[in-house]
């Protein structure tokens, strides 16, 4: 089974002061021990790196970027971006982000039903949290 990894999952797992840290660290450990395929996309990588750099510093961000080599990173192309943009426009003015909208398009394209993260938008869209 493939699991999509959201920015919220990456950040909580990396930040020991985050109230969701223990749960996300366990979710990653469980996923890896079960041989789950971890998938994210290029916009999540950019969003995560920017937030992580600001909140946790350069060294933690470099560690995150190096760890991506053990994951599948989908590089968002124009068709996927346009699908995400369509969803974003339909959901406006909710607080659903463009990155989340593109995440849902990636998950649909790769038939991924579960995610690692703490963002309730995923459950609202019918995806299940991996725990």
Image (tube, grey):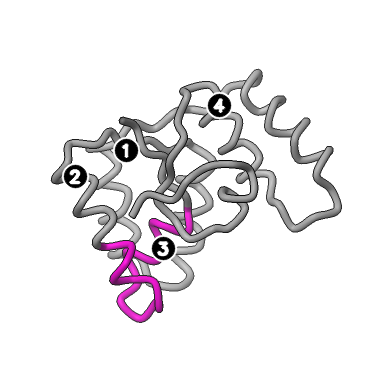
> Sequence order check: which comes first, mark 3 or mark 4?
3
Q: Are marks 2 and 4 in contact (CB under 8 Å)?
A: no
The secondary element bearing badge 2 is classed as helix
Q: Residues within 10 Å of mark 1 (few under 14, many from 20)?
A: many
Please report the bounds of the magenta region as a residue range.
Answer: 7-25
Q: Are marks 3 and 4 in contact (CB under 8 Å)?
A: no
Determine which of the numbered discs, if any, sits on residue 119 in the image. Answer: none
Using the numbered discs, state the Cα–Cα distance from disc 1 to disc 2 in whole angstroms.
8 Å
Residue corresponding to mark 1: 38
- Residue 94 quadrant: bottom right
Tell me the mark number nearer the camera, choosing from 4 and 1: 4
The secondary element bearing badge 4 is classed as helix
> Sequence order check: which comes first, mark 2 or mark 4?
2
Q: Are marks 1 and 3 in contact (CB under 8 Å)?
A: no
Determine which of the numbered discs, if any, sits on residue 32 in the image. Answer: 2
Tell me the mark number nearer the camera, choosing from 2 and 3: 2
* Dominant secondary structure, magenta: helix
Question: What residue sits 66% from the left and 40% below the top?
Answer: 101
Left/right placement of residue 34 relative to residue 4 reads left
Question: What residue sits 62% from the left and 36% below the top?
Answer: 102
Residue 112 part of the magenta-drawn span: no
Q: Is residue 24 above or below residue 36?
A: below
Tell me the mark number nearer the camera, choosing from 3 and 4: 4
Using the numbered discs, state the Cα–Cα distance from disc 2 to disc 4 in whole angstroms.
22 Å
Which image quarter holds the C terminus?
bottom left
Q: Is residue 114 above or below residue 119?
A: above
Residue corresponding to mark 3: 11
């Amino acid at each position: 089974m493939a699991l999509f990894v959201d920015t919220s999952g990456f950040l909580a797992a990396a930040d020991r002061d985050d109230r969701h840290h223990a749960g996300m660290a366990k979710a990653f450990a469980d996923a890896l021990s079960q041989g789950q395929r971890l998938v994210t996309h290029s916009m999540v990588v950019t969003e995560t790196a920017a937030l992580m750099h600001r909140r946790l510093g350069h060294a933690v961000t470099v560690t995150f970027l190096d760890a991506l080599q053990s994951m599948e990173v989908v590089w968002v192309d124009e068709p996927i971006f346009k699908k995400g943009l369509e969803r974003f426009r339909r959901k406006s003015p909710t607080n659903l982000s463009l990155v989340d909208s593109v995440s849902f398009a990636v998950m649909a394209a790769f038939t991924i039903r579960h995610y690692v993260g703490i963002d309730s938008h995923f459950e609202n869209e019918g995806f299940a949290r991996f725990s």
